[in-house]
Amino acid sequence: MGIQILVIALIIMLIMTYLLFNRDILTPFFITIGMFLVSSLVAWLNVDKWGFSLSYFTILIMISMLMSFGAGAYFAKAVSRRIDVNKPQKTMERIEIYPLITLVFIFVLLLFLAKACQIIYAMSLQYGNTEGLMAMWSTARSAVLDYGANKSRLLNHMTAFAKAIGFIYCWLFLQNIVTKKLKKSDLLLGVPVILAILIQILGTLSRGFLIEWIAYIIMLYFILYSKFHGWKKMNMTRLLIIGGSALALFFVFFAMLGIMGQRLGDRSILDTIFFYTGMSIPSFDGFLTNYVSKTAAIGGETLYGIHSVMQKLGFELPEQSRHLEFISFNGTSGNVYTSLRRYINDYGILGTYIIQFYLGAFYTFFYQCLKKHSNTFLMLAYAILAHPLLMQGIDELFLSQYAAVGTVNLCIYMIFAYLTIYYFPEKVRIRRSAQKG
């Protein structure tokens, strides 16, 4: 009965949010409730198989914490009304990129891909790979997950650099699609994106980065589309078709990488999808019912990046693993608990209400600024930060993944990529056009 009540409550909240925020389905609060609703619906579909029941206390905590996020969102919306638009919004146009620049970056990414293969293959040999190249990814992944093997710093930087290049080229490609001025030559823009994803497959040794790419692409496309059409209300049918297609593509690649990593076990692909999408809801209930803080330091389950830097500076902090303990339901085990679990464990229930309020305010203020200012960096940054927003119903990523040195590296590489691929070449093109005129 508990899961049904939660689903009904979330549907009511979704409808109210849709009305309170001017029927804007891209507003962060609408997205947050929507993602919790998706996880709850999947949990409902598997309630008999997993054999769980939600306590009313869990429902109360979850709904009230989402309302705290909504309070922050509504506060930020009210504040953002005072933001003035100092200059008119720029019209979106097709972006021209010099093919030579793209070819140079393709060559660099090919070198990075070759080097990443070499590093991962060497790691796999060190940990017992006897089956050659075909088994290098699964062996290296097992070495990292099961034995705590460390990836090289060079590989991490190559992965971040490739990711930045891929994100920039993805933006260029999507903008040309949205403006309906895509040319055959633009297919070249997709090559760096594909190479960046291949490098990330090797560099991250995980499947989670695919969710980040899907979130980035979906959010960036909808922002570009809304911006191009003057921020008119998004067509729900378009949203469902594009979002559904993107998710279907993600699950295909997710399953393929699971087969490569030998992580599916006895589960079917559909069971695996349900497992990762809906297990967080009963798991959170199990955590909350038997809540005892397990953190050995402040931010033990959220501030891994900051703890890592402090340890390198000489501070004595306990070693922490981002992977949480498993909890079992009728033989099905999971270790994802929604974003709320990590906040509650590290900062308590009161602290979580405060964090939820500020997250709602942060994302909503960011979104409102984006609607009022034609700033490419704001748009790209928001699309990147869509990942933890979309993942809230499954796991916490805003602090645990993005409050880290890797985020600083990504920002630096993104700025470099933006300047070299688009900004400086665009200045040269404009100057040449003016000289000809």
Image: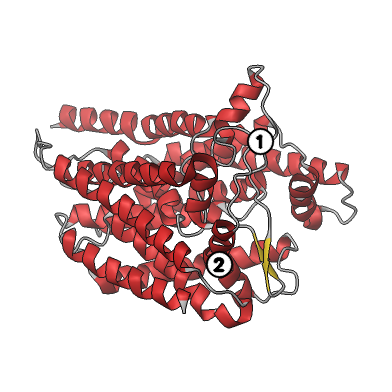
The disc placed on residue 324 is none
Identify residue type, mark 2.
Pro
Q: Quadrant of the C terminus?
A: top left
Task: Please say whether residue 184 is visible from this viewpoint.
Answer: no
Residue 280, how many percent across, how many down?
54, 62
Residue 208, how many percent across, how many down?
57, 54
Q: Residues within 10 Å of mark 1 (few under 14, many from 20)?
A: many
| Mark positioned earlier in the residue sequence (2 or 1) | 1
Between residues 164 and 148, which one lies in front from this camera angle? 148
Between residues 203 and 404, which one lies in front from this camera angle? 404
- Among the 4 quarters of the image, the one containing residue 298: top right
User: Label 2 vs label 1: CA separation?
Assistant: 37 Å
- Among the 4 quarters of the image, the one containing residue 78: top left
Name which residue lies at 16% across and 40% down: 79
* Lateral position of residue 72 relative to residue 214, left or right: left
Q: Is residue 187 above or below residue 430?
A: below
Q: How many numbered circles does the render carry?
A: 2
Q: Residue furthest bottom?
A: 48
**Which label lies toward us, 2 or 1?**
2
Task: From the image, tell me which residue sits under label 1.
Answer: 155
Question: Which element type, helix, strand or loop, lies under badge 2?
Answer: helix
Q: Residues within 10 Å of mark 2 (few under 14, many from 20)?
A: many
Residue 296, how many percent across, how many down?
64, 35
The disc placed on residue 282 is 2
Question: Which element type, helix, strand or loop, lies under badge 1?
Answer: helix
